[in-house]
Image (cartoon, rainbow, N blue to C red):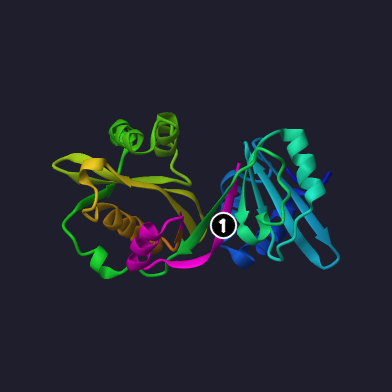
């Protein structure tokens, strides 16, 4: 539901809300994706809007245990944030660094800064290769999850992959195969009109330093662009940055995750 803090707003207001968020569509991707994919009347999502006579100042979007704070003018009401934490308990916050830097988080929250990048054209040299890279189907979900677990641990659930493959809407999964086995993976999330986020990119330990992840990201990014969805991603180390920049990504801002 949408609220002016505590007052319910008609669902039709979502179009005004989306117009505001699309003013900085890349940095507001998570909020846009949640609204378009789940709807503002979803039982798992709530949206609060801080607005004055000049228009929207800040949007607070809660989806399950995640809270996105979006403000094109970098404004935050710390008293309201404190009330949300008091009501819902510990949540994972994310948003532009310029916005979350204004939030007075209570003790126990840890800020994790990273960079946000997007791409408009993929460097052709990463697409002209003989690697077997393709979008997986439901019959490959278990094999994909085993590789994912070996790279990232078991906090990413098989049920989520299976559900997204059975009901494709906002996510897809790609794999690079060598001798018939998956050795490198990557996925999208928060796919919506004009945008998509690339996440969970990795290669099994024995096959690293061979450029597989770069080629997979290039293929996934190119396929998204062909569907008029601008791919975006996070990175937080120089090695990742250099790889993504060679593919064609450009830094568009600084982002903070806090939980």
- Residue at the extreme front: 107
Q: Is 89 in front, or is 185?
A: 89
Could you tell me residue 161's position as x and y percent? 41, 36
Could you tell me residue 3's position as x and y percent? 79, 47
240 drawn magenta = yes
Residue range (magenta): 233-259
Q: Can residue 4 be seen in this view?
A: no
Q: Is residue 122 above or below residue 137?
A: below
The tally of labels here is 1
Q: In which quarter of the image is residue 205?
A: top left
Image quarter hosting the C terminus: top right
Q: Looking at the image, which residue is at 40% across and 33% down? A: 162
Q: Is residue 131 visible?
A: yes
| Few, some or many residues within 10 Å of mark 1 (<14, 14–19, 20+) | many
Judge left or right: residue 257 versus residue 17: left
Could you tell me residue 60's position as x and y percent? 71, 50
Could you tell me residue 254's position as x and y percent? 55, 61
Q: Is 213 in front, or is 54?
A: 213
Q: Mark 1 points at which residue?
A: 255
Secondary element under disc 1, as helix, strand or loop, is strand
Q: Is 1 in front, or is 212?
A: 212
Q: Looking at the image, which residue is at 30% across and 36% down? A: 147
121 drawn magenta = no
Q: Is residue 110 above or below residue 242?
A: above
Q: Looking at the image, which residue is at 36% across and 68% down? A: 248
Image quarter hosting the N terminus: top right
Judge left or right: residue 207 versus residue 76: left
Q: Looking at the image, which residue is at 75% across and 56% down? A: 76
């Amino acid at each position: 539901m949408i609220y002016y803090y505590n007052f319910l707003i008609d669902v039709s207001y979502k179009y005004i809300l989306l117009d505001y968020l699309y003013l900085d569509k890349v940095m507001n991707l998570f909020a846009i994706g949640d609204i378009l994919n789940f709807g503002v009347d979803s039982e798992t999502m709530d949206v609060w809007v801080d607005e004055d006579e000049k228009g929207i100042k800040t949007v607070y979007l809660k989806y399950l245990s995640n809270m996105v704070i979006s403000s094109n003018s970098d404004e935050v009401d710390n008293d309201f944030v404190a009330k949300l934490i008091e009501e819902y308990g510990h949540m994972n916050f994310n948003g532009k660094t310029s916005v979350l830097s204004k939030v007075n988080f209570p003790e126990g929250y840890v800020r994790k800064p990273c960079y946000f990048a997007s791409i408009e054209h993929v460097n052709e040299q990463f697409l002209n290769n003989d690697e077997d890279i393709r979008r997986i189907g439901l019959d490959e979900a278990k094999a994909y999850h085993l590789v994912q677990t070996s790279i990232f641990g078991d906090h990413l659930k098989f049920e989520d992959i299976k559900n997204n493959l059975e009901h494709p809407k906002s996510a897809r999964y790609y794999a690079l195969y060598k001798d018939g086995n998956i050795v490198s993976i990557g996925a999208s999330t928060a796919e919506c009109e004009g945008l998509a986020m690339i996440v969970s990119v990795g290669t099994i330990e024995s096959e690293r330093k061979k450029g597989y992840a770069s080629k997979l990201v290039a293929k996934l990014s190119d396929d998204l662009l062909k569907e008029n969805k601008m791919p975006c991603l996070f990175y937080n180390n120089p090695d990742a940055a250099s790889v993504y920049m060679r593919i064609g990504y450009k830094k568009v801002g600084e982002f903070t995750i806090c939980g």
